[in-house]
Structure formats: C-alpha cells, structure tokens
Image: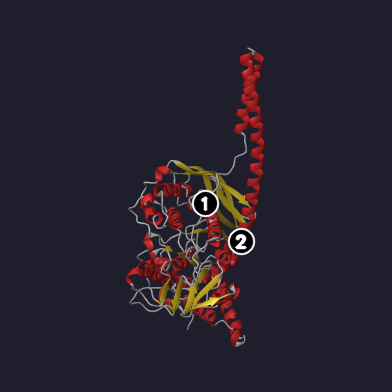
C-alpha cells in the first residue's frame, strides 16, 4: 500500500502548554481512520498540521507527490459567508476556470442534496447540516485521494447522517474522520487513533473495539503501576529504617545502604508506568420527579418558528409525565427546535397567562431548557454569576455560594477561573457550564436541543447514563442514534406536517430514509455511488457518460415501483452536462 503522508515526532504548543508531543503517524492509500479524544485535546489542530495549514513546533510531515489532500472544516470559513452555495464550491478553483468547472460544482451540489433552488442562497443562511454538505462538496472538487474530515456529523439530521455513513463506506480513497458519533465510526472506519494525555494511541480496530482495548490497557497499566508502587514503598520504608539505624548506631555501612536504596527508589520512580490523566470532568444531571399524571400537554399545537411565519407541523395530542424521556426526531428544518422554543417561551410567560392555549403546563412544574446556541448564559457574567439564578431556583436553596463553588470545581473549572467571563469560554466549556446550571436547578422537565454538539464520546455516554437515571421528564432533540436508543423510552416523529408517536425505532429510521429533505422536497436522492472522481480528460468523460447511460437504462427497465425517479433525474442532469462538456449535439 502506497504511503500518502507520514508525520514524525511532531509537537505543537497552544500558548505555553503543549497540546501534544512526539506524535507520529502514517497514512496510506485506503486507510479509513477514526480520530477521537476529549474536547480540546488537539484533534482539529492535528488535521490542520497534516494539511499544512499549520506548522509543527517540532518534527516533520512528509507528503507524497501523488497525494491530494482536502480538509472538510468543522465550520464554514468567514471568507465564504458572503458567497452563494454554487460560488462557494467554485471558489476552490481559479476564477478564470469557473465556467469550465461549473458543471462539476452543480453536479456535486445536486448529489449533496442541494437542488437548484438552493444554489443561489448565501451560505450564511444555510442550516448547519447544509453547510456541512457544502463543505464536503468543496473538498471533493479537488478530486482528493486523502480526506481530512473535522466533525462532519455535527448538525446533521438522521437521513443525512445515514447518507454520510454510506458515502464514507464507499469512498475509494483514504480518510481521517474526527467524530463523536461512535455508530458512524464503527461502520465507516477500520482503524482508530485515540488522542489522550498529549499522545496518539494507534489501534487496527474500529472505534468501539479500540476504546475497549485502550480500557484494558489502562487496567493492565494500573495494575503494573500498583505493583511498582508497592516495591517503591517497600524500598522507601527499608531505606528510612536503615538511615535511622545508621544514625542511631553511628554505622556508616547502614547509612551507605540507605543511600543506595534511595537511589534505586529514584530510578524506579523515573521508570514507573504512567497512568492516564483521565477525563477532565464527569457529566451529571440532577432532577426531581413530580407525582402528577401530566406535567406538560399539547393540544393540536401549530408549531411556527415565529408568530408571523408559516406553520411547520401540527403536534397532535401529546402529553408527558415524570420518567418519560421523549426523543423528538425529524429532518433538519422540520421544526423540532421551534417546538422546544415555543414550550420554553410559554413556560417563561406562564404567570402572564399568555401564549397558545394548545400548551398546558402543570402549575408547579419547573422546566429547564438546553439551547443548542448556548445563549442562555450571558457573555458578560462571571462563571459564578451565570450559575446563581439556577442555584437559587430550589425551594430549599441554602449555602448557594458553596454549592456553586463545588459544582464548578467538580466540572473541571479550577477556583482561579470562577471569576472568568462566560464570553471567554470555548464552545465545549460553555456547554459544560450549562449542564452544571441545569443540574443545580433540579428541574422537573428538561427540554434539550442538540446537547451532544459539544460533547466527546465519554461525555455522550455520561449524558446517556444521566438521562437514563433522570427522575423527571425529558424532551430530547438529537440525531445521535446511540443516545436515542440508550436513553429514551418514547419517540415522537415529525414528518409531513404532523408529529406522531412511534414505538419501533427501526421502522422509524426506515421512514426517515425514504422521506425527502424538509428543506427542499424536489432535491435529488443522495447516494454515495453517484459521487464521481472529477477527471476532465475526454476519455474519462466518455467513460462516465457510458456508465451513466447504462445505469439509467437499467433502472428504467425495472418495474415502475422499483425505479428511482430522483436518481434518474440526477443521472439525466449529469448526462446533459457531460454532453455539453463534450460538445455533443443536443
């Protein structure tokens, strides 16, 4: 297997602290690698080093002459914010070649679920999932054989997540995938790099098996460390005893033996097996149950993003009580977040008797809200000030200052940081602070909008455990299948303008896959098999044309109920583009 890229003993410092040290790795032709680790450990930085966007402080990175690297960024770059979707993809090519490459950009956008209606939209107006697909289309314009993907699964709805999984499985080149979605990593990758304790651990295993292997290694190292420590403790005790005897009995021989033992202790301590520093914090959620038949009820609520906006869906008749953990599922743009915002606004104004009569809240219910934008916490507040309103909500709230201090320390915020401003925190730290706030408030009902966006794998598992043991009620908007399956016991599906209760997740997933995107019902079906390599020679274009016409003819020969009309439309569009490129007579 040909080596595409090799990194040798690279180190990188962030401010005065080393982010990682002496990392080495090799990427070859068809490597499918998952890169995981705690938030802030340096995964995104490593990708930027590998594609030469950053230079390492130490070490070297060698790239083969035949290696074409494309990096899919975690967020839309600022210089693309003013461009429309089509020109954001075309901007990967020289301006003078935009006309030549326009058909390829249009083809990729179509295959990334961007119908022509979306091509002229400014990129800043696109949803998070659409921006991720746009960035992937940009990356593919270079016909890379090595993709570096920085959390592409963030903000994706379930249908697009399933497409991404299929795309990565069929991708013929190599890739490094940073993701906190264990299901995606297990199905799409064959090797795993785990970044921890400023080092990179390599496993020829998919994510779940690699994490298990690392856990077993940690256990063995802990046992080895304990055995070594036992010997060190024995020698230290003996050295201390001999030194005492040497002094009491004025015996130089005993004193000399004591010093020899002390030197041996120093050697053993220096060579002692290192233990992992572990996770920076432990996620927990405190809540309270309420013995009531109904904490919250919906009566044919018409869900709208704003009062003067179009109705997105009708809630039907729904209710929730303590112990129920509802997964609110649907495609991006269908109105899930709008429903949570409407419930939160109704709760905030309940004492004013305003808001839609279709929302009924128990008068004694305390309701909390995790907003995916994390704007509930004021930028100008210190960490202590941000938590005070939440800590004061409990009827028995006493020793508030002490509770806040302990909660911050347990969440990994050192005491010296408690007067830091919220606006100075990273996204992951801000999310951590909001989890602390929700736990301090001890709510009866939690509304959680995409709480996993800033969580690593360990954080997601801790959230699943916390929700599973949460005594109150939860309405959860997430596209994380593992979290839904582990933590939820009720399922509401938003689809085709209605919200319905479902009891069977496999059939719900099947319904989602066959449902057109909520953002553009006329868009083509997304399939990884339709993403071609972007060759431009006449022979390659002719080969592609023959392949597409064969696929189209074969699909049209099927029985009508087995045909794929949207895929046929995408093929026909690409065939027309190829004919124009080849100057065929129409």
Q: Would residue 67 be visible to someone looking at this image?
A: no
Q: Residues within 10 Å of mark 1 (few under 14, many from 20)?
A: few
Q: Quadrant of residue 299?
A: bottom left
Residue 225 vertical placement versus 297 (above, below): above
Marks 2 and 1: which is nearer the front? 1
Toward the bottom, the furthest residue is 560
The residue beneath circle 1 is 282
Alpha carbon separation for disc pair 2 and 1? 24 Å
* Residue 26 placement, left or right of 400: right
Indicate how the structure is coloured in the image. Answer: secondary structure
The image shows residue 13 at horizontal and vertical percentages of 46, 43
Return the residue nearer the eye: 240 or 535: 240
Q: Residue at x 38, y 73 (%)?
A: 305
SS for dot 1: loop
The image shows residue 409 at horizontal and vertical percentages of 46, 46
The image shows residue 100 at horizontal and vertical percentages of 43, 70
């Amino acid at each position: 297997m040909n080596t595409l890229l090799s990194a040798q003993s690279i180190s990188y410092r962030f401010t005065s602290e080393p982010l990682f040290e002496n990392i080495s790795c090799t990427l070859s032709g068809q490597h499918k690698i998952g890169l995981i680790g705690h938030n802030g450990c340096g995964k995104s930085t490593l990708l930027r080093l590998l594609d030469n966007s950053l230079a390492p402080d130490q070490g070297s990175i060698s790239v083969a002459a035949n290696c074409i690297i494309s990096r899919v960024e975690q967020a839309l770059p600022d210089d693309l914010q003013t461009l429309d979707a089509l020109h954001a993809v075309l901007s990967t090519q020289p301006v003078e070649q935009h006309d030549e490459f326009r058909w390829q950009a249009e083809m990729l956008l179509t295959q990334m679920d961007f119908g022509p209606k979306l091509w002229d939209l400014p990129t800043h107006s696109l949803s998070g999932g659409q921006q991720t697909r746009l960035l992937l289309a940009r990356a593919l314009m270079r016909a890379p054989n090595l993709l570096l993907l920085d959390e592409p699964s963030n903000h994706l709805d379930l249908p697009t997540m399933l497409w991404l999984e299929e795309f990565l499985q069929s991708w013929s080149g190599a890739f490094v995938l940073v993701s906190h979605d264990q299901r995606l990593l297990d199905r799409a990758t064959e090797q795993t790099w785990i970044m921890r304790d400023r080092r990179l651990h390599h496993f020829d295993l998919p994510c779940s098996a690699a994490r298990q292997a690392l856990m077993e290694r940690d256990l063995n190292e802990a046992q080895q460390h304990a055995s070594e420590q036992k010997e060190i403790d024995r020698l230290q005790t003996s050295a201390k005893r001999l030194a005492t005897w040497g002094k009491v009995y004025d015996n130089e021989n005993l004193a000399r033996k004591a010093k020899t033992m002390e030197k041996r202790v120093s050697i053993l301590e220096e060579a002692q097996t290192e233990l992992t520093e572990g996770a920076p914090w432990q996620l927990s959620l405190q809540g309270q149950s309420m013995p009531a038949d109904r904490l919250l009820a919906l009566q044919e609520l018409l869900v709208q993003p704003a009062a003067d906006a179009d109705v997105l869906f009708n809630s039907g008749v729904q209710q929730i009580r303590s112990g129920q953990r509802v997964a609110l599922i649907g495609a991006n743009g269908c109105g899930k977040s709008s429903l949570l915002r409407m419930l939160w606004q109704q709760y905030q104004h309940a004492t004013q008797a305003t808001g839609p009569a279709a929302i009924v809240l128990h008068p004694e219910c305390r309701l909390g809200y995790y907003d995916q934008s994390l704007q509930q916490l004021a930028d100008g507040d210190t960490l202590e000030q941000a938590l005070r309103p939440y800590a004061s909500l409990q009827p028995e709230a006493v020793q508030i200052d002490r509770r806040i201090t302990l909660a911050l320390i347990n969440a990994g915020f050192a005491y010296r940081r408690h007067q830091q401003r919220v606006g100075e925190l990273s996204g992951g730290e801000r999310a951590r602070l909001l989890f602390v706030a929700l736990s301090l408030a001890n709510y009866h009902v939690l509304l959680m909008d995409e709480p996993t966006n800033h969580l690593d794998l360990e954080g997601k598992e801790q959230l699943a455990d916390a929700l599973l043991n949460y005594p109150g009620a939860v309405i959860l908007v997430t596209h994380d299948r593992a979290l839904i399956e582990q933590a939820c016991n009720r399922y509401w599906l938003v689809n085709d303008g209605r919200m319905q209760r479902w009891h069977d997740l496999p059939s719900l997933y099947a319904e989602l896959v066959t449902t057109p995107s909520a953002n553009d019902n006329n868009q083509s079906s997304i399939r990884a098999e339709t993403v071609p390599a972007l060759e431009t020679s006449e022979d390659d274009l002719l080969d592609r044309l023959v392949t597409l016409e064969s696929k189209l003819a074969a699909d049209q020969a099927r029985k009508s109920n087995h045909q794929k009309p949207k895929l046929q439309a995408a093929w026909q569009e690409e065939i027309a583009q190829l004919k124009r490129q080849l100057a065929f007579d129409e």
